[in-house]
Amino acid sequence: MTPPYPSAIKQRLPPEIIDQIIDQLRGNNRALSKCNLVCRSWRPAARYHLFYEVKLSGKMPHALSILFRGFTPLSLIIRILNVSEVASNIYNSWDKAFSTLGSSLPALHTLRLTNVYFSQLSSASISSVIYGFQSVKNLHMSSVIFHSLEDFIRLIQGHKQLEELAIRNVWWESEESEESIRQSATRTISYISVTTPCRVILQGVSHRIYSWLASGKCILNIASLEYCTTMDHNLTSLDNLLSKFGSNLHNLSLNLHPMMHTFLIAPGFQYPQLLSRCPNLESLEFVGIVLSPPLSRGYGWILNVLEQASVDQLEVVSFHLLCNQLPVLNQVLWNGIARILSNPIYKRLRKVVFHLKGDADNRAKTSITERLSSLSARGVGLECIPTY
């Protein structure tokens, strides 16, 4: 609205009206930017929606970091920062950016690093990343290269209040011996236990990261673990992790790639006692179940894990299924699942959840409900949640 509208029209609108307007325009940055912003309260609302999550990528990070540092209202709005494509040919610009980014974004709670080459940054920039983002609660790293494992350990050590740590494809350039790794961990880590429960997501990580997490040198209070792997054929790495902090876990999510199934269901394979290492576990998830032959074969390992329960601990068991071929549902060992979960050791079980992707007509939901009706009869809730 612009003059000559009466001044009464230009009074501050009620918050609920503003929220509805912003909801209508959310995602349409062009429309938001062209608003005449009649209401004073519209400005911060529009700014919030535009800058709540920001991505820094390419060759202009320093200019943006100057903007954040010089415009306080904007820097206080940013909650999520995505940093990507920090390559060797532009690292000088990122050196300047990292030196001020952390202190310029006091409200930041999530930092995502993708395709970042820390090995190309100066030690001052690395220190700024480690110690500058003190407000960060969620740290995600994907395809990140450090100069050494010690730099990676220092990064974790610098964020003691993490609530979520996601690691996927993290490497370092220098080769270090196992003895060197142990010495560097001892040298750089202060073993003061933290109380903030942390969810750790591991996907395609190095065995040295597994070793470090299992060594007892990690300062994080790991209460939830999401474990995704294609290479841990005998589950030794997982067993080592759980032997160290399994007693502290309340939630465990397993995403074992189908290429591992031939190893897990081979005759004579000795399953590590995973659940016995997690006596306080309350929630267990099985993720990445693909109902498409031949990938649908081999999920018998799920029964082997469920049979390991030795105390009445679990309250929720969840399955994430891709239902692209409904007839393959017959290959899932429903009778075995119903039998095991009806065991008295699961007397605390209150809910079984199925996250169903591709079940547009609810046929999978209907089939699952029928096959697990015995659980419903004993008071266990069955919940089917569609995902897209």
Image (cartoon, rainbow, N blue to C red):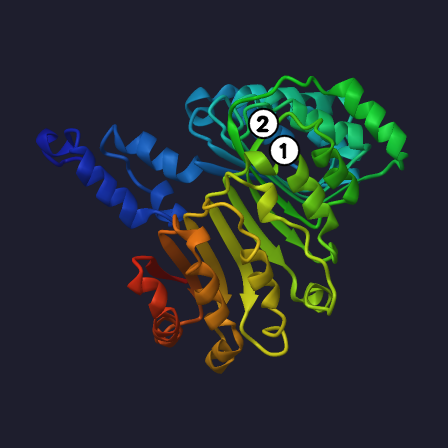
Which three-letter amino acid code belongs to the residue tagged 1? Pro
Quadrant location of the C terminus in the rendered image: bottom left
Q: Position of residue 294 (x, y in %)?
A: 63, 78
Q: Are the residues flagged by discs 2 and 1 in contact, CB closer than 8 Å?
A: yes
Q: Where is residue 248 in the image (x, y as percent from the top left)?
A: 55, 34
Which three-letter amino acid code belongs to the residue tagged 2? Ser
Query: Which mark is on residue 148?
Result: none
Q: Is residue 237 shown left or right of residue 299? A: right
Q: Is residue 185 shown left or right of residue 349? A: right
User: Of 354 and 15, which appears nearest the observer?
Assistant: 354
Q: Which residue is drawn at 54% across and 27% down?
A: 136
Q: What element carries label 2?
A: helix
Asked if 233 appears above or below 81 in the picture, the reply is: below
Query: Which mark is on residue 65?
Result: 2
Quadrant location of the N terminus in the rendered image: top left
* Quadrant of res 160: top right
* Residue assigned mark 1: 61
Q: Position of residue 170 (x, y in %)?
A: 73, 42
